[in-house]
Image (cartoon, rainbow, N blue to C red):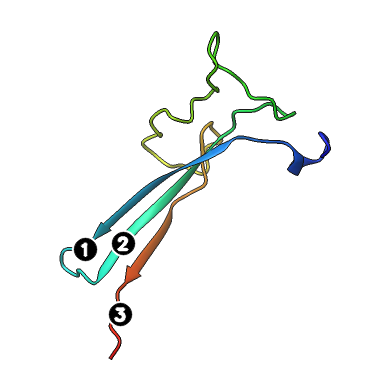
Amino acid sequence: MSRDHPWSVFGGVTRPRFVFYVDPANPREAKGWIQPFFFGITDKYGITNLQPATPYPSPDPLAPLPAVCDPTKQSNPYCFGTLMFVIRRFEIE
């Protein structure tokens, strides 16, 4: 393990917003989306940044997620985008 290697350093945590629902008009189909948010809670050496006078990281990964996911905005937490999916039920004939 080397401090100079980018994959050897802990960078932070990822927390997803997960939304899943069944379409009442078509109960054989479920829809949803995932929005992964990255919380960069460490410095460039992988040392965790703490909130003043507390043992908790800064920014707090358990705080409410931002209302809007904008991957063009370089913020902390950073949203990677919205990944949409559809799950369909098929019956074997």
Q: Which residue is mark 1?
A: 23
Question: Can you say which quadrant of the picture contains the C terminus?
Answer: bottom left
**Which element type, helix, strand or loop, lies under badge 2?**
strand
Mark 3: which amino acid? Phe
Mark 1 or mark 3: name the one nearer the start of the chain: 1
Front position in the image: 83 or 5: 5
Q: Given contact means CB atoms under 8 Å apart, are the residues at marks 1 and 3 in contact?
A: no
**Which element type, helix, strand or loop, lies under badge 3?**
loop
Mark 2 or mark 3: name the one nearer the start of the chain: 2
The residue most toward the bottom is: 93
Figure check: 8 above or below 76? below
Front position in the image: 80 or 17: 17
Q: Residue 11 lies in what quarter of the image?
A: top right
Inter-mark Cα distance, 2 to 3? 15 Å
Mark 2 or mark 1: name the one nearer the start of the chain: 1
Disc 2 crowd, CA 10 A, few/some/many (<14, 14-19, 20+): some
Mark count:
3
Q: Nearer the viewer, mark 1 or mark 3?
A: 3
Rendered residue at 28%/83% (across/down) = 91
Mark 2: which amino acid? Lys
Rendered residue at 41%/51% (across/down) = 34
Q: Relative to residue 11, is residue 66 drawn left or right? A: left
Figure check: 57 above or below 4? above
Q: Which residue is mark 3?
A: 90
Q: Position of residue 15 (x, y in %)?
A: 48, 40
**Which element type, helix, strand or loop, lies under badge 1?**
loop
Front position in the image: 66 or 62: 62
The residue most toward the top is: 53
Mark 1: which amino acid? Asp
Question: Can you say which quadrant of the picture contains the N terminus?
Answer: top right
Q: Position of residue 17 (x, y in %)?
A: 40, 44
Q: Which mark is residue 31?
A: 2
